[in-house]
Image: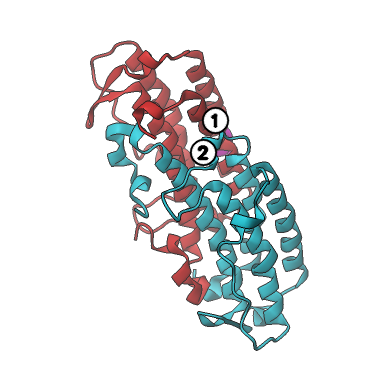
Chain colours: A red, B cyan
Amino acid sequence: MKDSQFNLKDAVAVLERTPAGLTALLYGLPETWIRATEGERTWSPYAVNGHLIHGERTDWIPRARHILAGETRPFERFDQMAQFTDSQGKSLGELLEIFADLRRENVAALVGMNLTEADLERNGLHPELGAVTLGQLLATWVVHDLDHVAQVARTMAKAYGEATGPWTAYLSILRDRV
Amino acid sequence: MKDSQFNLKDAVAVLERTPAGLTALLYGLPETWIRATEGERTWSPYAVNGHLIHGERTDWIPRARHILAGETRPFERFDQMAQFTDSQGKSLGELLEIFADLRRENVAALVGMNLTEADLERNGLHPELGAVTLGQLLATWVVHDLDHVAQVARTMAKAYGEATGPWTAYLSILRDRV
């Protein structure tokens, strides 16, 4: 799927499913799964949910609006650590609900932009990456969701890695990102 | 989590969530996502669902029973290609329902075994891996689910990889298993 193959309807179809997907996979799980990490400086499923919330608040739709407003300043930098303060005192269930609410609002905002093909080609300035298009931003929103869904599954899998004994040889996910 | 840290209740908590997780992520998605693959000889989300169904029918619970029956023969070999014939003519929605029904039955069967710590140490003979324990089989069931959830997310992510433009640099999932 090239740049030109990005399709807003297909993108929305994924974006609107992510909160329910994560809720179905994670809500009610024992803390041992929710708090598992892949090691130092890696994120638990709990941390990932906080990060997704911060993205809804400060990244995707704010940046889309920035581009559509014709801003020439670069985007605000994204805080990769915000979730470690913002999530304090909240249960995973609360985080999942906050994420679902924000995502619903943001998908509605995206659909309400009635973007044309020409809009998707409009440029923004990323503080590190330089020139990017609105279409690339929206494709990144989708892939970013999927990256974190995979991360949640991988992190949980690794928590049981040693317990699989000889089967470890068949479970490739245990050797991703090590 | 070592062998000794395997916990049946935690394992069941994951196993019983997988069908709802996949359904929430996939049901109703456009075919372009469902049929995406990572390239030749890799599986689409649709194929993964058929594979999970075949596992419910022939792998996990049958092998657990084989061990508990004290069988000294090796397990039956698992057919890694069965889904390409078994799924024919079925929609993804049908596959998700079949998987959910089989998983519900199999989790009930697992819980009904009232396994003791000693049971988890009982041995079976894998046709390729040799001696394995029931606990390792059950841990593998869990990790196998998570491996395929991650695969589904990774496969979908790669379908939009090029569309992310310069952001590709930040989306590590696009470089897993290439």
**B177 relative position to B91: left or right:** left
The residue depicted at 38 percent of the width and 20 percent of the height is A64
Extent of the magenta region = A93-97
A78 shown above or below B124: above
Q: Which mark is residue A13?
A: 1
* Callout 2 crowding tier (Cα within 10 Å): few <14, some 14–19, many ≥20: many
* Callout 1 crowding tier (Cα within 10 Å): few <14, some 14–19, many ≥20: some
The residue depicted at 64 percent of the width and 49 percent of the height is A28
Q: Can the viewer see residue B116?
A: yes
Q: Which residue is mark 2?
A: B33
Q: Nearer the viewer, residue A78 or A104?
A: A104
A83 shown above or below B126: above
Looking at the picture, which amino acid does disc 2 mark?
Trp
Where is residue A48 drawn, in percent x and y? 45, 44
Quick check: marks 1 and 2 in contact, CB under 8 Å? yes
Locate the N terminus of chain A by quadrant.
top left
Q: Chain of mark 2?
A: B
Answer yes or no: are tags 1 and 2 on the same subunit. Answer: no
Main secondary structure found in the magenta portion: helix
